[in-house]
Image (cartoon, rainbow, N blue to C red):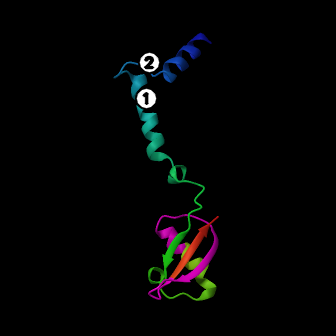
Amino acid sequence: MKIILSTLKKVLFWSYERGSWQYDLMCVLILAFIFLSPNSIYQSRSSATPIVVTGAEIGPVEPADLEQTIQYFLQRKGHAIKILRIEKAEDDSGETRYVVYPK
């Protein structure tokens, strides 16, 4: 039991000498966590900020296929979100914009 507590104390306080196999193992574990963990860990889950998509970006869309088309477009851009609602708006120049509110 004393060996386990001693080892935990050394790991928590990073007490191993640089160049020892224990130090190298801890560095490898940290790097493995950074590079092998999925990107979703590092993304904010409470993305209440709406995303604006222009009509020129997605092209002509049938109203029935609008949500599916925008969902696919956002996935390609790296936004893996679920859509709560979509509002259609036009700016001063007459360009169609879709304001997408994520869940």
Q: How many residues crowd mark 1 within 10 Å: few (<14), some (14–19), many (20+)? A: few
**Numbered range of the magenta stretch:** 72-96
Report the quarter where the N terminus lies. Answer: top right
From the viewer's perspective, is residue 49 above or below residue 57?
above
In the image, what residue type sits under mark 2?
Ser
Q: How many residues crowd mark 2 within 10 Å: few (<14), some (14–19), many (20+)? A: few
Give the mark nearest the N terminus, 2 or 1: 2
From the viewer's perspective, is residue 67 above or below residue 39?
below
Q: Is residue 91 left or right of residue 24?
A: right
Outermost top residue:
2
**Callout in the foreground (2, 1):** 2
Who is closer to the viewer here, 82 or 98?
Answer: 98
Disc 2/disc 1 C-alpha distance (Å)? 13 Å
Who is closer to the viewer here, 36 or 84?
Answer: 84
Residue 31 place in picture, x, y as percent: 42, 39
Name which residue lies at 58% across and 16% down.
4
Disc 2: which residue: 15
